[in-house]
Amino acid sequence: MLFTLSRSPAQCDLPTLLRQASPGDALLLLQDGVLAALVGAHLDLLLAAPISLYALRNDLEARGLSGHISHKVTVIDYNHFVELTTVHRSQMAW
């Protein structure tokens, strides 16, 4: 499954999201969700999960965060986003 997080991690229930995730799932951070890629408690929670973690480059750049996120988060563009949607047929937006 592909999960997308578009809200700030302070405004959503990440533990609930991660309880629904299974090994092999992916989480794409976009819009204000890219704030979860900053070093801190939210990122630690995401990195401990058995999922692949991605952030959308355009949203990082729009918020001036490109050089400030963890190197453990894979930064992708819209083309890779489309690829993720074809690999993960089921999707859930948060």
Image (spheres, rainbow, N blue to C red):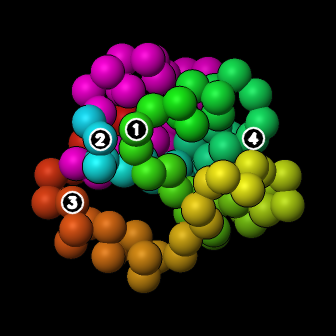
The quadrant in which residue 8 appears is: top right
Quadrant assignment for the C terminus:
top left
Q: Distance between the Cα atoms at labels 4 and 3? A: 25 Å
Residue underneath mark 4: 38
In the figure, is residue 87 to the left or right of 11?
A: left
Residue wearing tag 3: 88
Q: Are marks 2 and 1 in contact (CB under 8 Å)?
A: yes
Marks 3 and 1, the one that precedes in the sequence? 1
In the image, 19: left or right of 66? left
The extreme left residue here reads 89
**Is 94 on the left or on the right of 59, as rendered?**
left
Label 4 vs label 2: CA separation? 23 Å
The residue identified by callout 1 is 50
Label 1 or label 4, whichever comes before in sequence order: 4
Rendered image quadrant of residue 15: top left
How dense is the environment of label 3, judged by Cα within 10 Å: few (below 14), some, or many (20 and up)? Answer: some
CA–CA distance in space, label 2 to label 1: 5 Å
Q: Residue at x 76, y 28 (%)?
A: 40
The dot on residue 23 is 2
Task: Name the element at disc 1.
Answer: loop
Position of residue 89 measured from the top left corner of the image (x, y, whole percent): 14, 60
What's the amino acid at mark 3?
Answer: His
The magenta region covers 1-21
Instruction: Tell me where residue 56 appears, x and y as whole percent.
Output: 56, 63
Q: CA distance from mark 3 to mark 2?
A: 13 Å
> Of marks 4 and 3, which one's residue comes earlier in the chain?
4
Q: Amino acid at mark 2?
A: Pro
Real-space CA distance between mark 3 and mark 1, rounded to the nearest whole angstrom: 15 Å
> Please, what is the three-letter code of the amino acid marked with disc 1?
Pro
> What amino acid is found at the position of numbered circle 4 in the picture?
Leu
Q: Is residue 32 visible?
A: no
